[in-house]
Structure formats: structure tokens, C-alpha cells
Image (cartoon, helix red, strand yellow):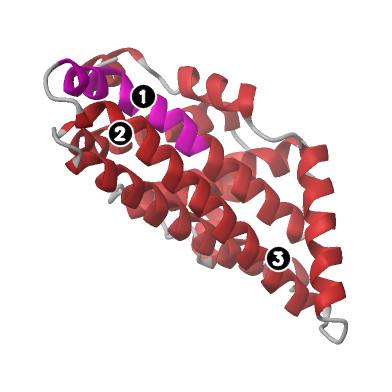
């Protein structure tokens, strides 16, 4: 799919459906986070809950940033082959990379949400997690969505989206992310392997940013809940 076709035909439903089909389940997210916390508590028996959360968050972000970097390198490999390989990378590679990268980033954010006590079997919590991941990615890609996600105004903005036509909003965020990411991913169609490093680097930096902004957003949201009349 070319960038023009993506922008013209996709309303966000295509990528949303693809990501949902391969995303981590809430049950598995909970299981993995429980394992991470047990390991952190075993290594640091004197740490309090906040310190354990920080260790687990850092582990999750590091692990999924590495996954994202690998996905970027793999889908850029056809661009290392002049001619046909470059064409395949320009038409199909970006879309495949987009789906893989978004799945990894949303999985990461789901694990982070679980680490901060969210119940992802609740649809509002799941949608909020997606919105936080997509908002962070759009910010890093230079697309304005309103207030920064890692701020009280940003968290309140996303909470308001949950009270309206939330699926419409989620699809719109997926569409914006897809278009912005596809533009950046065109760098990977450069021949002779130049794009492999570009793809890996873009995905890694983007995933790191989303993870760190998500942690800030979850922390802010928790603080807001603890305040009266927030």
C-alpha cells in the first residue's frame, strides 16, 4: 500500500483491527507484570511499591524498545536490495512495519498500565491505554493532538474522549499515527541498506519516548485520582 492509498482509503479501522488481532491480552499482560514484580522484589527486598514500579517500568520500556528496533530493521531489509527490493520496501514495508511497531508500542503501554494498577479488562482502561500510546507517538512524530499527554491537561483531554464516541477517536488517532509514521518510514526505501539503520533507529526512539510519556501520564492520572474534586 502506498502512502497516498493509505491516506485516501484508511480511516484508522484497518490498522486498529490488525493491531487488536495481534495485541497482547489483558490476562497475559497481568501475568507478565506479576512475574516482573516478583523478580524485582526478589532482587530488591527493601524497595517499596513505588520503587518496584519504577524498576518494572524501566524493564518493560527497555525490552519493548529493543523489540521495536528489531521490527524496524527487519522490515527495512528489502530496501537494501536496489530496484525491486526498494520498490517492495516503499510499497509494503512501511505498512508492515507500522502494524508491527504499533502492536509493540501498545503492548508496552498495556504492560505499563497494568504495572500502575489498571484493569485492562475494562474497556475504558483499554481505550485509555491506546490513546496514551498513540498520543505519545503522535507528539514525537510532530503531530499536535491538543495538550501534551504527560500533563494534567492531556490526561483530562483523554478522559473526556472516553465520555464521547471513543472508538471514533481511537480510529482517528490510528489514522493520524499511520500517516505520520508512513511519511517517516519512507526513509527506509533508500537503497544499499541506508534505510535499515533509519528504520531501527526511528522505531527505537519512538518506543522509548512513548514508554516514558506513558509512565508520566499514568503517574499524573493516579495523582489526580487521589485529589478531591480532581
**Going from the N terminus, do you reach mark 3 or mark 1 first?**
3
Residue underneath mark 2: 76
- Is 43 on the left or on the right of 145, as rendered? right
- Is 160 on the left or on the right of 118, as rendered? left
Residue 204's place in the image compared with 2, above or below, is below
Residue 57, position as x, y percentages in the image: 65, 64
Give the main secondary structure of the magenta stretch: helix
Which residue is at the front of the view, 61 or 143?
A: 61
Residue 86, position as x, y percentages in the image: 18, 23
Which residue is at the front of the view, 125 or 162?
A: 125
Q: Quadrant of the N terminus?
A: top left
Q: Secondary structure at mark 1?
A: helix
Residue drawn where x is 50% and y is 58% of the image:
154
Residue 49, position as x, y percentages in the image: 82, 76
Q: Secondary structure at mark 3?
A: helix
Residue drawn where x is 36% and y is 24% of the image:
95
Residue 64's place in the image compared with 152, above or below, is above
Residue drawn where x is 54% and y is 21% of the image:
18
Residue underneath mark 3: 56
**Mark pair 3, 1: CA separation:** 31 Å
Q: Indicate whether residue 182 is drawn in magenta.
A: no
Residues in magenta, as a range: 84-102
**Mark pair 2, 3: CA separation:** 30 Å
Residue underneath mark 1: 95
Image quadrant of residue 222? bottom right
Residue 115's place in the image compared with 109, above or below, is below
Amino acid at each position: 500500500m502506498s502512502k497516498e492509498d493509505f491516506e485516501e482509503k484508511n480511516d484508522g479501522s484497518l490498522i486498529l483491527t490488525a493491531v487488536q488481532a495481534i495485541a497482547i491480552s489483558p490476562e497475559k499482560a497481568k501475568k507478565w507484570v506479576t512475574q516482573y514484580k516478583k523478580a524485582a522484589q526478589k532482587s530488591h527486598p527493601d524497595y517499596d511499591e513505588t520503587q518496584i514500579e519504577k524498576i518494572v517500568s524501566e524493564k518493560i520500556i527497555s525490552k519493548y524498545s529493543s523489540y521495536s528496533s528489531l521490527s524496524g530493521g527487519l522490515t527495512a531489509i528489502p530496501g537494501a536490495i536496489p530496484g525491486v527490493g526498494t520498490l517492495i520496501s516503499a510499497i509494503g514495508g512501511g505498512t508492515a512495519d507500522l502494524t508491527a511497531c504499533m502492536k509493540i508500542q501498545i503492548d508496552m503501554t498495556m504492560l505499563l498500565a497494568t504495572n500502575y494498577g489498571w484493569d485492562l479488562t475494562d474497556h475504558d482502561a483499554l481505550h485509555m491505554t491506546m490513546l496514551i500510546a498513540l498520543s505519545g507517538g503522535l507528539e514525537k512524530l510532530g503531530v499536535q493532538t491538543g495538550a501534551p499527554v504527560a500533563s494534567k491537561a492531556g490526561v483530562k483531554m483523554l478522559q473526556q474522549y472516553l465520555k464521547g464516541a471513543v472508538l471514533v477517536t481511537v480510529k482517528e488517532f490510528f489514522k493520524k499515527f499511520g500517516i505520520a509514521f508512513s511519511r517517516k518510514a519512507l526513509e527506509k526505501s533508500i537503497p544499499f541498506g541506508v534505510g535499515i539503520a533509519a528504520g531501527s533507529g526511528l522505531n527505537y526512539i519512538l518506543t522509548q519516548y512513548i514508554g516514558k510519556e506513558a509512565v508520566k501520564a499514568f503517574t499524573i492520572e493516579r495523582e489526580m485520582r487521589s485529589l478531591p474534586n480532581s
